[in-house]
Image (cartoon, grey):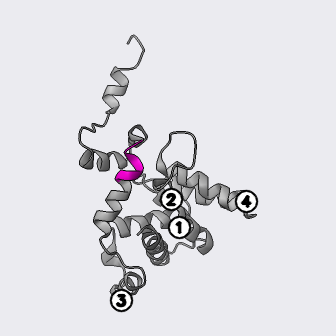
Amino acid sequence: MLFHHSRRVFLFGSLHARALGLTPDPELLYLAAMFHDVGLLTPFSATEQRFELDGADHARAFLLERGFPAAAADVVWTAIAVHTTPGLPGRMGPEIAATTYGVLTDAIGWSLDRLDGGQVEEIVAAHPRGEFKKDFLQVFVEGLKDRPDTTYGTVNADVLEHFVPGFRRTSMVERVTGAPWPS
């Protein structure tokens, strides 16, 4: 499921980039797309951190071990690390923006109506969605339920709040008022 999702992210991101006049490096965009959700499957660090950072760290190590320049690894790292952060990626480099545009299109249908219907059909035929909505959300639950504190301030908390009985997100107000400062 995540393989097909990641391939669709690359293809939808490429289509959006072309339509917007962005020129991402296709190899870096592909790598960002393929690694963007890997942190949901197995935490890749000993540190409890957001799944996006687990995936980004793993991708960076993968690229550096294979001789990619550090600047290229940093682009892929950033694209993965911020792909769930609303508003930010579209103001960054083309690989970063295109990765997020692909994610948004495949996950929530963002700007799907702006894409050529025939191309969308080809992409989905090659990389079927199956029961994507159900399966995708289940992968999120499984990847986040044992590290719920990493969802603070992210859309990931929405998933746990919906699917995990008893989960309650901590608000910013609670963090400020509960801080150890006297005032």
Query: Mark 4: few, some, or many residues within 10 Å (few <14, many ≥20)?
Result: few
Label 2–label 1 contact, CB within 8 A = yes
Q: In this view, does 57 lie above or below 148?
A: below
Rounded to the nearest angstrom, the CA distance separating label 1 from label 3 is 23 Å
The circle on residue 102 is none
Residue 110 drawn at (x, y percent): 33, 67
Give the mark, 4 or 1, whose residue is nearer the N terminus: 1
Distance of mark 4 from mark 1, alpha carbons? 17 Å
Which residue occupies 53% across, 72% down?
22
- Residue beneath disc 2: 38
Within 10 Å of disc 1 (Cα), the crowding (few <14, some 14-19, many 20+) is many
Residue highlighted by disc 4: 65
**Mark closer to the chain start, 4 or 3:** 4
Q: Is residue 26 left or right of residue 50?
A: right
In the rendering, which numbered label is found on residue 34?
Answer: 1
User: Image point 27% across, 36% down: which residue?
Assistant: 168
| Mark 4–mark 2 CB contact (< 8 Å) | no
Density class for disc 2 (Cα within 10 Å; few <14, some 14-19, many ≥20) is many
Residue 54 appearing in the image: yes
